[in-house]
Image: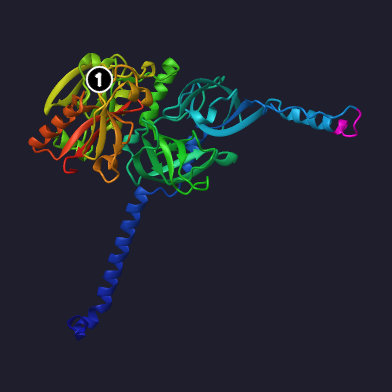
Amino acid sequence: MKAAIMTYADRRQGPARALAALVLGLALVMAQAIAANAKMPESFADLADQVSPAVVNITTSTTVAGAGNDGPRPIVPEGSPLEDFFNDFMDRQQQGQRPRRSSALGSGFVISEDGFIVTNNHVIDKADEIEIEFFSGEKLDATLIGTDPKTDIALLKVESDEPLPFVAFGDSDAARVGDWVVAVGNPLGQGFSVSAGIVSQRGRALSGAYDDFIQTDAAINRGNSGGPLFNVEGEVIGVNTAILSPSGGSIGIGFSMASNVVTKVVDQLKEFGETRRGWLGVRIQDVTEDVAEALELADAKGALVTDVPEGPGKDAGIEAGDVITTFDGSDVTDTRELVRLVGNTTVGKAVRVVVIRDGKSETLKVTLGRREEAEATAVPVALDKQNVEEKTILGVTVAVLNDELRTQLGLDEGLEGLVVKEVAEDSDAYEKGLRAGDLIVEAGQRKVDAISDLEERIEEARDAGRKSFLMLIRREGDPRFVALSLDDE
């Protein structure tokens, strides 16, 4: 092989070339090490020293009522040898039923020198007494300022003669997957503890409408709840809230509520003692691919309006079947995005909402109400139709709503439409979730009063060359759009 053939001159120059290669290799290794050290801290000790005075342990006490004993007291004949035994036994039982004190542990952090403290709502929920223990060992009683169960955030206040050490919030939106983070708190009641990891993912949702969690593999355990998640600059970018674990201990999947959500909640709790979120006054669902095809939309995105009760949306002219694509200048990708945008907007603000209606874009101006004061109301439709006719269409057997069916289904007066009596299990309708007892109130974005209305809407969709067909149904009062395939017959 050519590469293996060396001349005499090559052999003489070999050591020099080898030395040069060695020097070059060492330089490359050192350069890589320097670059790595520029990104990864050698230690988190300085950061721990910096933030630890502002991180607190939280102990709560709650009065728990004793278990009641509704059963009859045993009757023992007077003078029986067992009389004293049973009396002593019942007295001990009654003592066990007295109210008792229950304690719980959690974490938190000070956000201002005058003593405001952030923690999780579930840490202090139903607590009678809240005690704060600082890193120095000092203990102070705390007062509850306000809570927000939707984001699991609570704001506390302690009074101190001296200014308290505190930490500042950072921009959680600036955190990138792979960035180093540090969780600080009181895991399993063991006291002050630090764990490090990275941002595993952002924008995680668990169960809440306002969820925006940072996922991290930094160790988070019971007792860490309410504690801060820091970036390497010592800024709080999350509040440690939950873990995913089959055992109850950390397996490297923890969730911290993003600071950009927390700061808005904290500001409102501090000012009002409660949250005041914007309310658009519409019920919505995501735009799926089949719904987008039925509505002839270019993309499956936006929020599809299923219902408009009395409120800001109705006053502004929003209608069921509208697809909201823009809210106050921000694009709406899905329902979760719209809920977050609306909730973060000031109550009473007039905003522009762009909707797609009948294939055309319209801009409406809506003055937002307050979500906390909003009450969901059913949308009244029309009167009864005494019609017992039924027919199977697209695998769905339907009948016109009458008094008998209204009573059987417990439907409100004023609702009308077609009752689903049966759904073929091999049909597209069954796959899309349509079930017996559902009420079809619209087809092709128009009300249906009779079976002939439904048939006409289907024919119109087929004549227009559509592959799917949109229906608005109600189940236990809740509206939902269902897009059925027209190839099912």
Residue 62 position in % (x across, y down): 61, 26
Give the residue pinned by disc 1.
385
Q: Is residue 146 visible?
A: yes
The residue positioned farthest toward the front in the image shown: 388
In magenta, the rendered stretch is: 79-85
Q: Is residue 81 magenta?
A: yes
User: In this image, 410 relative to 319: left or right?
Assistant: right
Instruction: Say few, some or many: other residues with alpha carbon within 10 Å of mark 1 (under 14 / 14 to 19 / 20 or more).
Output: some
Vertical placement of residue 31 versus 463, above or below: below
* Quarter of the rendering occupied by the C terminus: top left
Residue shown at 30%/44% (left/top)?
Answer: 425
Vertical placement of residue 408 versus 485, above or below: above
* Colouring mode (rainbow / by chain / secondary structure / one colour): rainbow
User: In this image, 90 relative to 359: left or right?
Assistant: right
Q: Is residue 22 magenta?
A: no
Q: Quadrant of residue 382?
A: top left
